Amino acid sequence: MSKNWKNVELSLAKILGGERVPITGRGRGSAPDIEHESLSIEVKHRKSLPDWIKDAMDQAEKSNISGKKLPIVILHEKHMKFDNSFVMVRLKDLKNLVE
């Protein structure tokens, strides 16, 4: 069995200055994947992400002509309350925000 997901969680915890929470004894939703001072982090590692998500971030980055704005993608589902939309940012940008 591949433990690649565990290595991903360990690497991300190190990058963000957090600590990976072992799955042993953890119930769904009872603890984050990574314990962090100001973030509740759930990691989802996949072989590939949908192209439309990558394209959306590419658009946000290319439209940042000045290079002074934070590129984000807002994911909204039909009939979803706007406040419940998801916001996607690159890890490097999130890291800069929390440091």
Image (cartoon, rainbow, N blue to C red):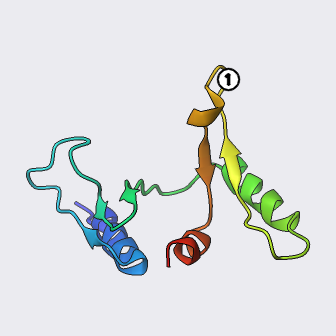
Q: Position of residue 15 (x, y in %)?
A: 42, 79
Answer above or below: position of 35 versus 15: above
Q: Position of residue 8 (x, y in %)?
A: 37, 69
The amino acid type, in three-letter code, at marker 1 is: Lys
Q: Position of residue 50 (x, y in %)?
A: 63, 48
Q: Quadrant of the N terminus?
A: bottom left
Picture mark count: 1
Give me the residue at 32% from left, 73% from top.
18
Q: Residue furthest top?
A: 79
| Quadrant housing residue 78 | top right
Residue nearest the viewer, comparing 91 with 11: 91
Q: Is residue 12 left or right of residue 23?
A: right
Q: Which residue is label 1 attached to?
A: 78
Give me the residue at 40% from left, 60% from top.
39
Q: At numbered mark 1, what does the secondary structure look like: helix, strand or loop? A: loop
Give me the residue at 10% from left, 55% from top.
24
